[in-house]
Amino acid sequence: MTKEELALEVIDRLKKEYPDAGCTLDYDQAWKLLVSVRLAAQCTDARVNVVVEDLYAKYPSVDALAEADVEDIERIVRPCGLGRSKARDISACMKILKEQYGGKVPDDFNALLKLPGVGRKSANLIMGDVFGKPAIVTDTHCIRLTNRIGLVDGIKEPKKVEMALWKIIPPEEGSDFCHRLVYHGRDVCTARTKPHCEKCCLEDICKKQGVE
């Protein structure tokens, strides 16, 4: 089975296993996803979803958050860790959205990468979830699972994993595929415990690389 064939089979099986998989960060506007994905660095999505409720209650718009004191943003987002740098990035990001984009999130990948605190993972998430464009989000679950399954070979650098996956994942499948990897990585192919291979829908086609 080629990597392309393996990829299509993995996509098909995960679709059946997690038909409704989507982004686990709560948001109803594009700028809120931009804020949440910055807060999610080294923090669980569940905690971010709780913390942003207080943030948006006090600062319900791009303009309001752009004008907020960085120290006040930091106080609210501190439970997510790295409070100072995250608050600084969020403040700077909202100012740019307000001043350069009329309060809107740009739908251009390279423009997103220029925003403070936005890397390839975040930009891909926004391109896929908000704008419905081809995207591959190489978070820790994606990197771990694609290596274990054998879709990539011993690659740990996020950008290199992304580039390898672009070659074998159909563009229209990338975003949802990565969301399903998150669900599968949390429930079955876990990081902190031994993977639950006995209940994995990919067990018979997985290379199980790096798994004892």
Image: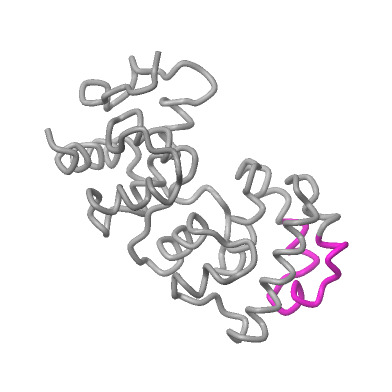
55 sits left or right of 117 in the view: right
* Highlighted range, magenta: 53-73
Q: Quadrant of residue 16?
A: top left
The picture places residue 199, in percent across and down from the top left corner, at: 34, 19
Q: Where 60 sits versus 170, above or below? A: below
Q: Of residues 38 and 209, which is closer to you in this image?
A: 209
Display coloring = one colour
- x and y, in percent, of residue 94 in the image: 68, 73
Quadrant assignment for the C terminus? top left
* Residue at 67% in and 48% down: 48
Q: Main secondary structure of the magenta part?
A: helix
Q: Residue at x 80, y 49 (%)?
A: 78
22 or 160: nearer the eye?
A: 160
- The question of residue 182 being in magenta is answered with no
Task: Judge whether 125 appears above or below 99 on screen.
Answer: above
> Residue 90 lies in what quarter of the image?
bottom right
Question: In the drawing, does residue 62 fall left or right of residue 183?
Answer: right
Closer to the camera, 34 or 166? Answer: 166
Q: Residue at x 28, y 42 (%)?
A: 15
